[in-house]
Image (tube, rainbow, N blue to C red):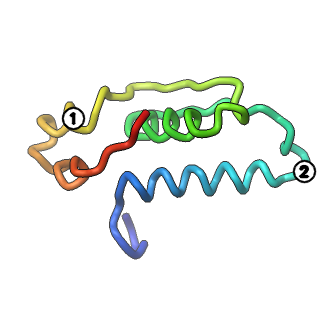
Amino acid sequence: YGLSEGSPSEKGLRTDAQTALDYIKKHPVIADTKLIAYGQSIGGAVSIDVVARNEDKFSGLIIENTFLSLASIDCCHDGKARHYLNQRAEN
């Protein structure tokens, strides 16, 4: 992804989402505000995961064009998603 170091992973997506949520919830203006998560495509799985792990911080979840599993999209991308398939989020 651009000039970033490392390589993308499901664990990295989960960590990034949780870190962003923790940062947002530290802001004094919105610290006590319930949030609505939105995820599109692969972001839908990330949103489902972060909301499931932090239900008390959210009042809603919107997902758009989200797939059932990474395995279900692998066939449509000539197997290019295969390197993600050895990781699994419980959501």
Spot occupied by residue 45 in the image (x, y as percentages of width and height): 42, 36
Residue at coordinates 15% horizontally, 35% vertically from top-left?
A: 76
Question: Is 5 left or right of 38, judged from the image as shown?
Answer: left
Query: Image quadrant for the C terminus?
Result: top left
Q: Nearer the viewer, residue 5 or 87?
A: 87
82 sits left or right of 7 in the view: left
Helix, strand or loop under label 1: helix
Question: Considering the image in quadrants, where does the N terminus appear?
Answer: bottom left
Residue sitting at the far right: 28
| Residue displayed at 49% across by 38% down | 49
Q: Are marks 2 and 1 in contact (CB under 8 Å)?
A: no
Identify the residue position indicated by label 1 in the image. 73
Quadrant of residue 66 within the rendered picture? top left
User: Alpha-carbon distance for marks 2 and 1?
Assistant: 40 Å
Disc assigned to residue 27: none
Measuring 64% from the left and 54% from the top, which residue is drawn there? 20
| N-term mark: 2 or 1 | 2
**Is the residue marked by circle 1 packed among few (<14), some (14-19), or many (20+) residues within 10 Å?**
some
* Residue labelled with disc 2: 28
Count of numbered circles on the image: 2
Q: Nearer the viewer, residue 62 or 25?
A: 25
Q: Quadrant of residue 34?
A: top right
The residue sitting at 85% across, 43% down in the picture is: 30
Q: Nearer the viewer, residue 74 or 14?
A: 14
Please name the amino acid that badge 1 sits on: Ile
Are there few (<14), some (14-19), or many (20+) residues within 10 Å of tag 2? few
Amino acid type, mark 2: Pro
- Residue 27 location, x and y as percent? 84, 53
